Image (cartoon, rainbow, N blue to C red):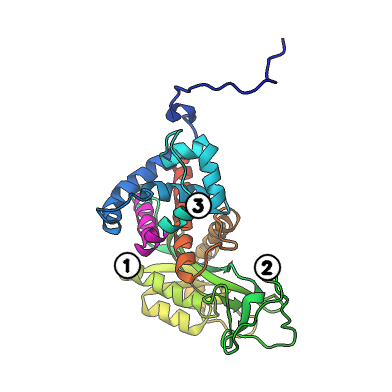
C-alpha cells in the first residue's frame, strides 16, 4: 500500500547518537582517527596561542576539522561551510559537534582562523601528517621530484593600477570601468589594489597574464606523497629557488636524486644541485639552447625512472585545483594563501595515506 508522506513532518526526539548514524565503512572514519592523533600532538602548540582568561573562542580542534572538510568537499566559502555544519550530520560528527550545538557565525570563524595562521599551525599539521606516512614506511628517502604551479589570486586585472597615481573615484563601485588598452603595465610600476602581493605573470608566450602566486611541491617518488611545499611570488626564478630551499635539508643527510621538468634545466640550478650532492634528473631542454644535463646523468637507468615518476606530481596539482580550492584562492596576501596551500597539501596526504592503507589492508 502507499505510504503516507504528504503531511507535515512530525516533531520528535532522536535517541540515536551521531556515532551510530555514520556507516562503519565511511571513508571519513580513518581520516578522523588520523586527525585526532595529530590534534592531540598539537595541543601544546594550541595552548601557547590562547590566553587562560577571557571569553572562550572556537576550539582549534573544531576549526581545523572544519577547514579539512572545507578542502575535502570543495566548499567554496566559510558561509557555505557554516550552512553545511548546521544541517549536515556527517559534518557535525567529524568536527565534534553535537546535534543541538549552535553553529558559529562565518565572520567569527574567519577571525578565529587568523590565530592559527599566526601560529603557523598549517606547517605543524603538515609535518605531523608526513610523520604518520613515515611511520607506515610510505616515504622514499632517496628519490624526489620538484615542480611548481600557478595559483590565480583573488583579484581582477581591473585592480592592477599604477603605484604613483592615487586611485580615482570609480564610476561604478561594484564594477568600475577601467580603460588600460595601450598602457604598458608591469609589476615594477603597477600593483593590485585588492591584493598588492599578487604578481602579474603569464605561463608562456601567447598566453594571457593574470595576477597569480606560485605554489611549489617536493614529492617523494615511492607513493607520490608531498614531503614539502611552499608558496612564493610568481616570477621566472621562483621555481628553482624554492626547489633548492626545499631540497637543502634532505640533501644534508644523504645523497638523493631529484626529477624535474624542462623549466629547471638551467646551468645555475644544475650546478647548485650538484653542489648540494643532489643528482639532477632534470628533463633536457634543447629547444633553443644546449642542455645542462649531459651523458654522465642520462646514461644511467635511474634517470629514465625519475623522468617517468616525476609526472605523478601533476596528480597533486590536479587534486589541489579540482578539489582543494587552489585553482583560484579566496584568500588575500601571500601569507594567508601560503597557509592554505600547505594545509591543502596536508589534506591531500591524508587522503593518499588512507587510500594506501586500504590497499594494503
Task: Confirm or deny contact between disc 2 and disc 1 (CB under 8 A).
Answer: no
Q: Within the image, what quadrant is residue 33 found in?
A: top left
- In the rendered view, does 254 fall on the left or right side of 174? left
Q: Nearer the viewer, mark 2 or mark 1?
A: 2
Q: Which residue is mark 2?
A: 174
Marking on residue 254: 1
Residue beneath the point at 70% across and 88% down: 183
The crowd level at tag 1 (other Cα within 10 Å; few <14, some 14-19, many 20+) is: few
The crowd level at tag 2 (other Cα within 10 Å; few <14, some 14-19, many 20+) is: few
Looking at marks 2 and 3 on the same chain, the residue that comes earlier in the sequence is marked by 3
Q: Nearer the viewer, mark 1 or mark 3?
A: 3
Element assignment for label 2:
loop
Q: Within the image, what quadrant is residue 354 found in?
A: top left
Image: magenta residue range: 114-132
Q: Which residue is mark 3?
A: 106
Label 1 – label 3 distance at C-alpha: 47 Å
Residue beneath the point at 36% across and 43% down: 36
Above or below — where is 55 with respect to 230? above
The N terminus: image quadrant? top right
Q: Position of residue 119 (x, y in %)?
A: 34, 62
Marking on residue 1: none
Looking at marks 2 and 1 on the same chain, the residue that comes earlier in the sequence is marked by 2
Q: Position of residue 83 (x, y in %)?
A: 55, 44
Q: Position of residue 131 (x, y in %)?
A: 34, 53
Residue 128 shown in magenta: yes
Amino acid at each position: 500500500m502507499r505510504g503516507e508522506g504528504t503531511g507535515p513532518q512530525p516533531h520528535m526526539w532522536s535517541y540515536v547518537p551521531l556515532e551510530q548514524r555514520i556507516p562503519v565503512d565511511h571513508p571519513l572514519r580513518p581520516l578522523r582517527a588520523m586527525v585526532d592523533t595529530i590534534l592531540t600532538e598539537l595541543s601544546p602548540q594550541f595552548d601557547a596561542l590562547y590566553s587562560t582568561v577571557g571569553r572562550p573562542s572556537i576550539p582549534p580542534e573544531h576549526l581545523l576539522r572544519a577547514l579539512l572538510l572545507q578542502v575535502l568537499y570543495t566548499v567554496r566559502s566559510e558561509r557555505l561551510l557554516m550552512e553545511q555544519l548546521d544541517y549536515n550530520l556527517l559534518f557535525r560528527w567529524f568536527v565534534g559537534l553535537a546535534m543541538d550545538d549552535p553553529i558559529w557565525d562565518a565572520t567569527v570563524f574567519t577571525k578565529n582562523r587568523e590565530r592559527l595562521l599566526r601560529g603557523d599551525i598549517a606547517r605543524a599539521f603538515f609535518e605531523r601528517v608526513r610523520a604518520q606516512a613515515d611511520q607506515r614506511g610510505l616515504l622514499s628517502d632517496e628519490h624526489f621530484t620538484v615542480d611548481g604551479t600557478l595559483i590565480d589570486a583573488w583579484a581582477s586585472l581591473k585592480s592592477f593600477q599604477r603605484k604613483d597615481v592615487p586611485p580615482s573615484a570609480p564610476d561604478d563601485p561594484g564594477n568600475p570601468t577601467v580603460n588600460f588598452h595601450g598602457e604598458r603595465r608591469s609589476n615594477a610600476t603597477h600593483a593590485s589594489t585588492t591584493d598588492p602581493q599578487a604578481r602579474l605573470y603569464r605561463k608562456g608566450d601567447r598566453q594571457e597574464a593574470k595576477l597569480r602566486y606560485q605554489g611549489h611541491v617536493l614529492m617523494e617518488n615511492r607513493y607520490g606523497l608531498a614531503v614539502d611545499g611552499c608558496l612564493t611570488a610568481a616570477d621566472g626564478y621562483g621555481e628553482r629557488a624554492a626547489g633548492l630551499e626545499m631540497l637543502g635539508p634532505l640533501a644534508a643527510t644523504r645523497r638523493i636524486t631529484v626529477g624535474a621538468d624542462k623549466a629547471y634545466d638551467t646551468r645555475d640550478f644544475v650546478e647548485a644541485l650538484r653542489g648540494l650532492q643532489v643528482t639532477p634528473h632534470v628533463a633536457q631542454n634543447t629547444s633553443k639552447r644546449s642542455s645542462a644535463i649531459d651523458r654522465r646523468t642520462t646514461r644511467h637507468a635511474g634517470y629514465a625512472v625519475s623522468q617517468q615518476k616525476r609526472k605523478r606530481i601533476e596528480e597533486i596539482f590536479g587534486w589541489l585545483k579540482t578539489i582543494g580550492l587552489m585553482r583560484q584562492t579566496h584568500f588575500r596576501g601571500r601569507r594567508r594563501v601560503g597557509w592554505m596551500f600547505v594545509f591543502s597539501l596536508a589534506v591531500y596526504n591524508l587522503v593518499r595515506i588512507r587510500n594506501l592503507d586500504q590497499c594494503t589492508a
